[in-house]
Image: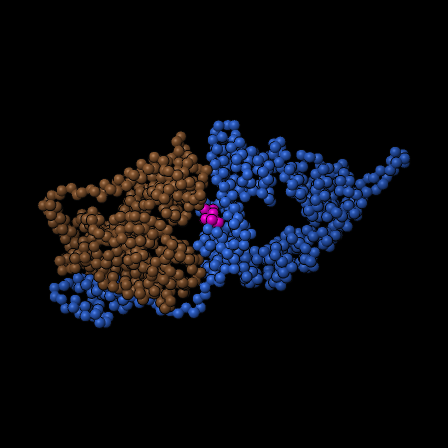
């Protein structure tokens, strides 16, 4: 409104410096202004205030809305899935307000499993939560449905809901985005991920190539080999190293086959006469070969021993065993894993741990069992990681047994904290029986983190875990109350979708 | 009365009470519990030896608890109400215990006594003398304020950002001395303007002009219509006798509670409750003032309908009102009528501005508004493609968008001229507070 702008301009500089605005506006305003200007005895300030007051009233009484058609405005698409129940939504609200992140994750899982989506008013809160907690982004994108995708058009921080642009992200994103996109695609469609990588390989620099190869770690397939072997010819050592690491993971790769053949030539079992030729015995012969310079089969193998107990050639052989699939030796010697390993318990013990590493690398369960058997119960030490290869019930039974007998309890607890499934009632009992004794060390934070693993069935027994020391007992009583509350929330979360 | 969880949690005085209230909403926490149509009660085992006795008057939503908390309502009251909302089957319809019936009867006795209370005899001559003295003081104060305003206008607004809030607060103190607290609070509101944000010039000049209009109105009081005279007196800060007001007949209606807004002013909580009469189609503003952590006289939850008689303060445009009698409350099952588009809103506003030019915001309900973004700014569009600017907190904007999905919605708003703040929306006849 022009008349009002004139008033503002005069007011800003002051009537001392600025002349009063000329009569402006139309009709009634002009008349009112003329009337004020004709009044005698008004000083300049009073005159201005009266003119401005009239203009102010005209302005606030004569508002006109902006008129603008918006033909390109798009509404959110209709949802194909039904909304979750009011009860489920209320549970989620409680979880979001109290920062119970593991239970939020559980709620999301349940919601997806029940083929439901979240009610619209919770969509912005969930999307905001997923900004910080990247791990829940895919689930949040799913449960927020079409409304979430539509909303993300207006907030770049919520773009993760738009899953259709994964390939575009691979082509146009920054290094971190491309790495994340490649990793996701690798999990979903390994061949396509490799095609992506091959397609952009000539345009990417050495650093990017090495970083992308690292995203394939742990999921190498025989089909990847030609591409990875090609990468061995790269100038950049970083890229070569990354390719070698991947090839070493594939039991059928040319690299691994070379390792196995070379190692096989150096280790043999021979029959020899004993007791003056009356009987025969078998003996292990190890002849580490001198290390030739720059041999092709030595890719990924260190030439120099960092350990004084191993000569250079012994160290090379050690690494070859480490990267050879254990199954090779069963064929090579025509013996069982236990029989083979027993040869490496005496003078040749220095190679024993190489077999353990190979069992871990190639996930050879029977070899892991054999190693633990030969090594003896309770003496695993460095071979503890092999326990992870055992079937879960067997692993769980070992943890329960060890915790009950107070054997290496801290290590067992660490295993329980990384347990891939929910704890059984028995495991929860042993774990909490241990942690309840140190309530100042294993605080509510620990139980919050583990809440999805702890079964609700433990609630009635929580009071039985009270430590003997009064100060600890008091602390545990408080913790038990809080844990009960958490478990009740978990129960509500689990039941939220039972309709 | 059945409140939703959202409505119950909106009663909580702070976040920790909300959280604790939710934690207490499990049957295991309550030793005993029961309900009738009029009341809800329970005994909660706290840290003391005896359980706390918590009771709620459901007709007028009042709380009482034997716990030592100064918060109101306390976590036990909230927990009990939440538990009932979540698991009504847990509450057997039984005879209330003595401690509940005693409290309820005391409450109704109190109400009756209040009604029977008669005015003490007053010394009318002394009252007139006091009024005259005050009028003189106010007139002197207004002269001083007029000079202050003229000085600002003479030297220009451009120097105001550098003067700081003290410049306005000093003058506000002078107005307190002149027994014109209404003007003092308007001066303080000028101090609250963000002088480093675009548009401060209009905000500042608007407020200065309102002060000028009040001064001129008071000088020419006798020539104004009686209702506007009362407005000018209220804006200056002359008190209104609420007992006299309550003695008036009032307007009985089913009032839809649109919003409850709270702000803190001079260590007082100012609560603005916006009502809409479902039968009379009138809006009402119920103000409550109370000290932090003290219970307000009454609780009005958005989304509820209150059957009550309101008495409106005399004004050229009646809006502010008192609750004279409250009979019942219930959860709204339908949506109120509303204006069809922005043109209707403006026409209503213009008529009101013509009679009362001092309003900060007007309430309204519009039947179909769509929130939409144009050049990264948020607008509210009606069916005639007319746009008004959306003024809301970021979180409220996202909630509004999430609820609408880009489709038009029935909306309650407050605002003026070209900017409006949504208070709530109706989706499937359910009122959602923003």
Point 38% across, 67% down: residue: B383
Please tell me whether the stretch drawn in magenta is mainly helix, strand or loop: helix
Q: How is the image coloured?
A: by chain
Q: Is residue B327 above or below residue B390?
A: above
Whether the magenta-drawn stretch holds residue A88 is answered as: yes
Residue at position x 25%, y 64% in the image = B351
- Where is residue A454, by image quadrant? top right
Residue occupying the far top of the picture: A469
Left-right relation of B273 to A479: left
Q: Nearer the viewer, residue B232 or A16?
A: B232
Residue A59: image location, x then y, percent? 26, 65
Q: Quadrant of residue A21?
A: bottom left
Between A370 and B225, the one lying in front of the other is: B225
Q: Position of residue A359 (x, y in %)?
A: 70, 45
Question: Do we see residue B265 in this rendering?
Answer: no
In screen coordinates, is A147 left or right of B218?
A: right
Chain A: its colour in the image is blue
Asked where in the image residue A393 lies, by quadrant, the reply is top right
Magenta stretch bounds: A87-95
- Residue at 25%, 50% in the rendered image: B322
Shade representing chain B: brown
In the depicted view, which residue is nearer to us: B323 or A227?
B323
For the point 38% across and 63% down, the residue is B368
Q: Position of residue A213 (x, y in %)?
A: 62, 55
The verdict on residue A170 being magenta is: no
Q: Nearer the viewer, residue B276 or B309?
A: B309
């Amino acid at each position: 409104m022009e008349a009002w702008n004139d008033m503002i301009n005069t007011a800003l500089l002051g009537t001392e410096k600025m002349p009063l605005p000329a009569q402006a506006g139309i009709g009634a305003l002009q008349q009112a202004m003329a009337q004020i200007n004709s009044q005698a005895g008004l000083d300049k300030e009073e005159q201005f205030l009266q003119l401005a007051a009239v203009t102010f009233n005209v302005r606030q009484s004569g508002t006109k809305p902006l008129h603008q058609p918006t033909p390109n405005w798009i509404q959110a698409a209709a949802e194909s899935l039904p909304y979750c129940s009011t009860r489920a939504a209320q549970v989620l609200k409680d979880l979001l307000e109290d920062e119970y992140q593991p239970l939020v994750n559980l709620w999301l899982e349940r919601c997806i499993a029940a083929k439901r989506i979240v009610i619209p008013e919770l969509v912005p809160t969930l999307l905001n939560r997923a900004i910080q907690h990247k791990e829940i982004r895919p689930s949040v994108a799913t449960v927020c449905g079409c409304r979430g995708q539509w909303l993300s058009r207006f907030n770049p921080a919520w773009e993760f809901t738009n899953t259709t642009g994964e390939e575009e992200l691979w082509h146009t994103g920054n290094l971190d985005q491309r790495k994340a996109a490649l990793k996701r695609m690798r999990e979903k469609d390994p061949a396509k991920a490799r095609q992506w990588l091959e397609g952009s390989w000539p345009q990417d620099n050495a650093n990017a190539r090495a970083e992308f190869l690292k995203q394939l770690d742990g999921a190498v397939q025989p089909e990847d080999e030609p591409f990875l072997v090609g990468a061995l010819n790269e100038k950049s050592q970083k890229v070569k190293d990354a390719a070698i690491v991947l090839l070493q993971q594939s039991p059928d790769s040319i690299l691994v086959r070379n390792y196995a053949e070379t190692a096989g030539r150096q280790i043999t079992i021979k029959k020899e006469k004993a007791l003056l030729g009356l009987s025969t015995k078998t003996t292990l012969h190890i002849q580490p070969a001198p290390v030739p310079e720059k041999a092709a089969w030595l890719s990924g193998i260190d030439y120099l021993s960092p350990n004084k107990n191993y000569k250079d050639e012994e160290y090379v052989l050690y690494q070859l065993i480490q990267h050879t699939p254990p199954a090779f030796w069963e064929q090579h010697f025509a013996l069982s894993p236990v029989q083979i390993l027993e040869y490496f318990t005496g003078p040749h013990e220095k190679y024993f741990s190489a077999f353990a590493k190979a069992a871990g690398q190639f996930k050879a369960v029977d070899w892991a069992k054999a190693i633990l058997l030969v090594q003896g119960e309770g003496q695993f030490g460095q071979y503890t990681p092999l326990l992870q290869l055992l079937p879960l019930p067997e692993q769980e039974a070992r943890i329960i047994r060890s915790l009950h007998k107070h054997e290496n309890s801290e290590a067992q607890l660490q295993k329980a904290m990384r347990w891939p499934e929910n704890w059984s009632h028995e495991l929860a009992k042993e774990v909490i029986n241990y942690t309840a004794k140190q309530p100042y060390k294993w605080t509510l934070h620990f139980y919050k983190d583990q809440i999805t693993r702890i079964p609700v069935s433990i609630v009635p027994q929580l009071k039985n875990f009270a430590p003997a020391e009064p100060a600890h007992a008091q602390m545990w009583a408080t913790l038990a109350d809080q844990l009960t509350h958490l478990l009740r929330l978990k129960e509500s979360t689990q039941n939220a979708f039972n309709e | 009365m059945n409140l939703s969880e959202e409505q119950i949690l909106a009663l909580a005085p702070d976040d920790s009470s909300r959280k604790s209230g939710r934690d207490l909403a499990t049957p295991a926490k309550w030793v005993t519990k029961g309900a009738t149509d009029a009341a809800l009660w329970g005994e909660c085992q706290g840290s003391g030896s005896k359980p706390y006795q918590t009771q709620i008057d459901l007709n007028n939503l009042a709380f009482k608890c034997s716990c030592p908390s100064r918060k109101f309502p306390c976590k036990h009251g909230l927990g009990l109400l939440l538990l009932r909302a979540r698991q009504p089957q847990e509450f057997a319809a039984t005879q209330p215990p003595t401690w509940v019936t005693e409290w309820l009867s005391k409450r109704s006795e109190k109400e009756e006594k209040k009604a029977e209370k008669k005015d003490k005899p007053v010394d009318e001559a002394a009252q007139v003398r006091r009024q005259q003295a005050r009028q003189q003081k106010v007139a002197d104060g207004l002269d001083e304020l007029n000079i202050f305003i003229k000085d600002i206008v003479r030297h220009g607004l451009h120097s105001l950002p550098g003067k700081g809030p003290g410049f306005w607060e000093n003058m506000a103190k002078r107005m307190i001395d002149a027994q014109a607290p209404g003007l003092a609070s308007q001066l303080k509101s000028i101090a609250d303007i963000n002088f480093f944000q675009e548009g401060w010039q209009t905000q500042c000049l608007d407020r200065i002009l309102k002060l000028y209009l009040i001064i001129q109105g008071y000088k020419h009081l006798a020539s104004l219509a009686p209702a506007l005279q009362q407005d000018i007196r209220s804006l200056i800060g002359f008190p209104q006798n609420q007992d006299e007001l309550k003695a008036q007949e009032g307007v009985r209606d089913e009032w839809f509670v649109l919003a409850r807004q709270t702000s803190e002013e001079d260590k007082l909580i100012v609560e603005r409750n916006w009502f809409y009469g479902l039968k009379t189609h009138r809006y009402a503003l119920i103000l409550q003032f109370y000290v932090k952590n003290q219970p307000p006289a009454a609780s009005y939850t958005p989304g509820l309908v209150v059957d009550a008689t309101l008495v409106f303060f005399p004004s050229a445009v009646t809006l502010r009102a008192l609750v004279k009698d409250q009979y019942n409350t219930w959860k709204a099952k339908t949506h109120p009528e509303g204006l069809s588009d922005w043109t209707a809103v403006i026409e209503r506003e213009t008529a009101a501005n013509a009679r009362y030019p001092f309003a900060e915001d007007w309430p309204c309900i519009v039947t179909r508004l769509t929130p939409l973004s144009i050049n990264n700014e948020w607008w509210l569009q009606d069916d005639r493609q007319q746009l008004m600017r959306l003024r809301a907190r970021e979180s409220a904007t996202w909630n509004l968008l999430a609820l609408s999905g880009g489709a038009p919605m029935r909306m309650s708003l407050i605002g003026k001229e070209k900017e409006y703040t949504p208070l709530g929306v109706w989706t499937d006849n359910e009122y959602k507070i923003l």
